[in-house]
Image: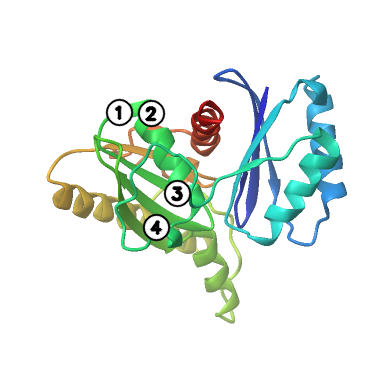
């Protein structure tokens, strides 16, 4: 079995694959000061709950946008699983041609999403990852990564509004029943939700105009559920990055 780990700025996603089947997946908060033993204890708890013995895990693959945690997770994998993880970084085989000015600047999370989108949908695709930031990643029919868009995430906008104003409260991020808010909380929820819906819809229209064709639109990430009503979003796949990690692991395992 394969353990896939996607380390994001806010959340860490973990999944165990048995072949191409995702047996179990978990989410936990990213904590940069947590040590290898702490992450190891959490992993063992997750595996025990799902009745998955560590002896069955023969490979690990990870990507991270938090560089200090790569070493921590390498140590954890060695100590608790007896194996070194394959780290998605420049130089490994991905099956995706990176058509950007400086490929080294591209986050590995965006690469694994592109790999998964091309494998699953096989057509021009736009992946919207709604996490700490909102990223739009564009993949051609041939599987080339063409570039994308980065915008502040929904939670960042909500926190900034609360932090930079004296009287506005922190609110739950949820879809309001109507656009016109009847009180301060519903007005903030409306501004955040419909503001980001507008950002997503307008950005998608502009991307497709530049592509010159329609594309498969896939949403993923911790806040993807908030925009499920956007008509242009055809699919929500919360495990897209884990699938991409599995595919990259298989490509490099065969190469070895």
Residue under circle 2?
A: 119
Please give the name of the residue rendered at 39% of the width and 46% of the height, measured from the top-left corner: 128
First in residue order: circle 2 vs circle 3: 3
Relative to 91, is 123 above or below? above
State if disc 3 and disc 2 touch (CB < 8 Å). Answer: no
First in residue order: circle 1 vs circle 4: 4
Mark 2–mark 4 Cα distance, whole angstroms, equals: 21 Å
Residue under circle 4?
A: 103
Mark 1–mark 4 Cα distance, whole angstroms, equals: 22 Å
Give residue 205's position: percent from left, percent from top. Answer: 20, 50
**Residue 95 seen anywhere in this rendered image of the structure:** yes
Mark 2–mark 3 Cα distance, whole angstroms, equals: 14 Å
Query: In front here: 23 or 177?
Result: 23
Residue under circle 3?
A: 110
Mark 4–mark 3 Cα distance, whole angstroms, equals: 11 Å
Quadrant where the image shows the C terminus: top right
Q: Is residue 77 left or right of residue 9?
A: right
**Mark 2 or mark 4, whichever is nearer to me:** 4
State if disc 2 and disc 1 touch (CB < 8 Å). Answer: yes
User: Mark 1: few, some, or many residues within 10 Å (few <14, many ≥20)?
Assistant: some
Query: In front here: 177 or 214?
Result: 214
Quadrant where the image shows the N terminus: top right
């Amino acid at each position: 079995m394969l353990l896939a780990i996607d380390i994001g700025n806010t959340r860490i996603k973990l999944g165990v694959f048995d072949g191409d089947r995702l047996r179990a997946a978990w989410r936990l908060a990213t904590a940069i000061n947590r040590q290898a033993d702490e992450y190891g204890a959490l992993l063992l708890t997750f595996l025990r709950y799902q009745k998955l013995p560590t002896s069955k895990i023969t490979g690990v693959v990870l990507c991270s946008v938090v560089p200090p945690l790569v070493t921590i997770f390498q140590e954890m994998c060695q100590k608790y699983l007896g194996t070194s993880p394959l780290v998605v970084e420049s130089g490994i085989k991905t099956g995706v041609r990176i058509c950007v000015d400086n490929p080294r600047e591209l986050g590995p999370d965006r690469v694994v999403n592109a790999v998964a989108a091309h494998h699953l949908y096989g057509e021009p695709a736009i992946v919207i990852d709604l996490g700490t930031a909102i990223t739009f990643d564009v993949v051609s029919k041939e599987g080339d990564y063409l570039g994308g868009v980065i915008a502040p995430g929904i939670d960042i906008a909500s926190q900034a509004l609360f932090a930079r104003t004296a009287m506005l409260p922190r609110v739950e991020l949820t879809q309001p029943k109507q656009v016109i808010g009847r009180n301060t909380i519903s007005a903030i929820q409306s501004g955040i939700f419909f503001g980001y819906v507008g950002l997503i819809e307008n950005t998608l229209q502009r991307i497709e105009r530049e592509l010159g064709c329609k594309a498969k639109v896939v949403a993923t990430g911790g806040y993807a559920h908030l925009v499920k009503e956007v008509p242009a979003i055809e699919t929500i796949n919360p495990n897209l990055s884990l699938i991409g990690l599995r595919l990259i692991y298989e490509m490099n395992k065969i190469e070895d």
